[in-house]
Amino acid sequence: MADPAEESAYQAAYGYVKSRNFAAAVEAFQEFLGRYPLGAYAPNAHYWLGELYLVVEPPEPELARQNFKLLLDQYPENAKVPDALYKLGKVHFLKGNRERSREYLDQVIRQYSGHPAAQLSRDFLDENF
């Protein structure tokens, strides 16, 4: 269970996402992870940083990739794993690595067939491969 200060800091950072202030959200999540690198909300913070690096101007697909990969490596049982795998498939596609993209998308479909990320992966493959 997260301590109240950690939860409050996470909610404040996430508030920027909800209000679509993506640059402020990146800064808030970076600050959050600086204070709570192993906190209860750290996996979610990495996921949201990954998402945010894809929508800030200019996009930062490599930083997105690093955050999604860190979530997978450090929190393999986290509920965000299927979504992070799907996003890694998209990031690798954006970076021009179609083979690696397909590997991630196929992994989502294979390991998480009932999860919404599996259908998103199927759709992405149908549209782009």
Image (cartoon, rainbow, N blue to C red):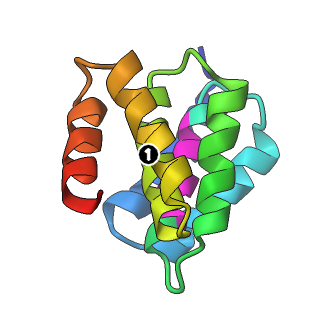
- Estimate how packed mark 1 is, as few (under 14), some (14 to 19) or many (20 or more) residues with alpha carbons within 10 Å: many
Above or below, comparing residue 3 to residue 63 in the picture: above
Instruction: Name the residue carrying label 1.
Output: 102
In terms of image quadrants, where is residue 8?
A: top right
Measured from the top left, where is residue 6 in percent x and y?
64, 35
* Position of 113 relative to 18 (above/below): above
Identity of the amino acid at label 1? Arg
Q: Is residue 52 left or right of residue 63?
A: left
Q: Quadrant of the C terminus?
A: bottom left
Residue occupying the point 54% across, 86% down? 58
Q: Is residue 12 visible?
A: no
> At 62% from the left edge and 31% from the top edge, which residue is drawn?
72
Query: Vertical placement of 106 versus 128: above or below?
Result: above
Answer whether residue 23 is visible to the viewer in this image. yes
User: Quarter of the image holding residue 49?
Assistant: bottom right
Task: Please say whether residue 49 is one of the residues in the magenta stretch.
Answer: yes
Magenta-drawn stretch, dominant element (helix, strand or loop): helix
Place of residue 20 in the rendered image (x, y in percent of width and height, measured from the top left): 35, 70
Stretch of the chain drawn in magenta: 44-53
Whether residue 32 appears in magenta in the rendering, the answer is no
Q: Nearer the viewer, residue 42 or 112?
A: 112
Residue 90 on image: x %, y %: 42, 56
Q: Position of residue 57 (x, y in %)?
A: 50, 85
Name the residue: 72% across, 27% down.
74
Q: Of all residues shown, which one is farthest toward the bottom?
A: 58
Q: Residue at x 41, y 56 (%)?
A: 15
Left/right of residue 15 with respect to residue 29 in the rendered view: left
Element under disc 1: helix
Q: Nearer the viewer, residue 18 or 48?
A: 48
